[in-house]
Amino acid sequence: MTDDVAGNGAPLLSVRGLHTHYGAVSALRDVDIDVRRGELVAMVGANGAGKTTLLNTLSGLQPLSAGTIHFDGDDISRLKAEKRVVRGITQVPEGRQVFGPMSVADNLALGAYTRGTGPDVDRDIDWIYGLFPMLAEKRRQAAGMLSGGQQQMLAIGRALMARPRLLLLDEPSMGLAPLLIEEIFETIRKLNADGITILLVEQNAAGALAIAHHGFVLETGEITLTGTGAELIDHPDVKRAYLGM
């Protein structure tokens, strides 16, 4: 890990009393979460629980209705999305959403748009190719021609090109075969071990909690359980609702 040991020190991200609405419909209610430097935090819950809305609110794509978001001690509650990227918050959206007509290489370069071009960016692209060798083989291929698993790797790689201090991952295992899911989760674990702070949103509760330092359960817009990843895996409510036990 870089800097702090995972879980120590002041929170990198601190959310208090967060409410979000879609028109008159309440999507998130009184959400409190902390993510500390170096942590891998999992947010699990059923489809429609509000997990994607939470990430979109943290990244600035969805406005909050009440509450505060602090990042590295600064209030970013009203900061525009692009300025949050500059601060170091990068989101990998649900469904990957790569730029299909563009090449793999151009997708990666686009991820560094806040940094411009230069040797550092070129070195980071090489690092991504080392992390995902399949992308190196297909660097000139249109991103839309990649398999689902390869597109997920590209989406993560594109986000990493911004050199995030906090990486928001939205359902990275969605629609992938079991072997690819294992590979994606192992990649996430390695990135965290290299010092990247991660907030991982997943319906795959078992896979997410197994690699998480800390976890939250989100149900119909509210946090209902919190604990270490191991504690939540062993919690009877989590076993019954999300682990099929």
Image: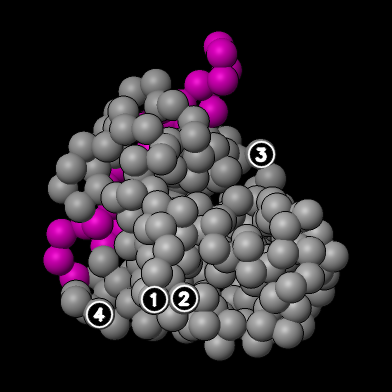
Q: Which of marks 1 and 4 is nearer the N terminus?
A: 4
| Circle 1 residues within 10 Å: few <14, some 14–19, many ≥20 | few
Q: Which residues make up the magenta segment?
A: 8-36
| Circle 2 residues within 10 Å: few <14, some 14–19, many ≥20 | some
Q: Amino acid type of disc 4?
A: Thr
Q: Amino acid type of disc 2?
A: Asp
Q: Which residue is drawn at 39% across and 83% down?
A: 193
Looking at the image, is mark 4 or mark 3 nearer the viewer?
Answer: 4
117 and 211: which one is in front? 117
Q: What element carries label 4?
A: loop
Alpha-carbon distance for marks 1 and 4?
23 Å
Alpha-carbon distance for marks 4 and 2?
22 Å
Residue 131 at least partly seen: no
| Residue tagged 3 | 48
Q: Is residue 67 above or below residue 207?
A: above
The picture places residue 214, in percent across and down from the top left corner, at 39, 66
| Residue tagged 1 | 119
Residue 198 falls in which quadrant of the image? Answer: bottom left
For this orientation, the residue located farthest to the top is 24
Residue 13 colored in magenta in the image = yes
| Residue tagged 4 | 2
Give the main secondary structure, helix, strand or loop, of the magenta stretch.
Answer: strand
Residue 187 at least partly seen: yes
Looking at the image, is mark 1 or mark 3 nearer the viewer?
Answer: 1
| Residue tagged 2 | 122
Alpha-carbon distance for marks 2 and 3?
39 Å
